[in-house]
Image: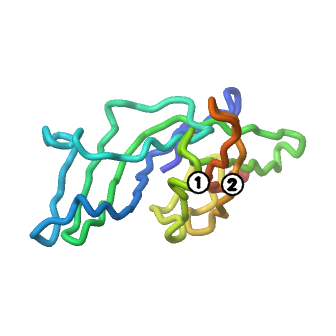
Amino acid sequence: RISEISQKSQTYQMHYIMEWRWRDCRLLVDCSYLSIPDTNPAFERFWAPAVHIAEREGDSKDMLAREHTVWGNGWDTYREEHVSTFKCSFDFTEMPFDTQTCQLTFSMLGIPDSIHKLLWSKRMVGESLADPEWEIQQPGDWATWSKNHEVGSMFGKITNSQLIAEFTLTRR
């Protein structure tokens, strides 16, 4: 859900779920799956990706929920549910008939793409988005792509894997 679209601060709030999957041979278990929510004392002993979203300005810690689902074949499906505030540079030159284009840029800072390569697994999915003042592009229609980005590190330049999602807000 997208809400609290602020033209003055050029921000919006979004309630979203991120899901990541990877295989870890250390997680082979003799059952079909195990579910480990963040309320389980063992949760912190599991690795999870530290995903950075460049446009994220704040996170509601009260709304954070995380869970690992470990499958018997060693696959880990990790989910994070957030409510966050994001920045989006608004262009008012066509106001009151303006369309704003917002991006979300996901990366794992400091981790070269030779170690962890980020890939989209499918189209964005989500509930229908609505706002009284703005027509919000629906998640299934968002543009998504991946790219490599060169960044400096203490060991020189590294290539960092990024995922980008782009959507529009059109004034009604």
x, y percentage for residue 118?
A: 54, 58
- Reply above or below: 38 against 25: above
- Residue 59 image-quadrant placement: top left
Q: CA distance from mark 1 to mark 2?
A: 8 Å
Residue 140 or residue 35, whichever sits in front: 35
Residue pictured at 14% horizontal, 65% vertical: 29
Task: Tell whether label 2 touches label 1 (CB within 8 Å).
Answer: yes
The structure residue drawn at horizontal position 22% and vertical position 41%, both measured from the top left corner, is 45
Q: Secondary structure at mark 2?
A: strand
Camera-side residue of 46 and 60: 46
Q: Which numbered mark, 1 or 2, is in the foreground of this view? A: 1
| Amino acid at pointer 2 | Asn
Mark 2 neighbour class, 10 Å CA radius: few under 14, some 14 to 19, many 20 or more: some
Relative horizontal placement of residue 86, taking residue 36 as reference (left or right):
right
Residue 165 against residue 61 in the figure, above or below = below
Query: Which numbered tag is attached to residue 148?
Result: 2
Badge 1 density bin: few <14, some 14–19, many ≥20, Cα 10 Å: some
Q: Is residue 50 left or right of residue 112?
A: left
Q: Which mark is residue 113?
A: 1
The amino acid on which the numbered mark 1 sits, given as a three-letter code, is: Asp
Residue sitting at x 45%, y 61% = 127
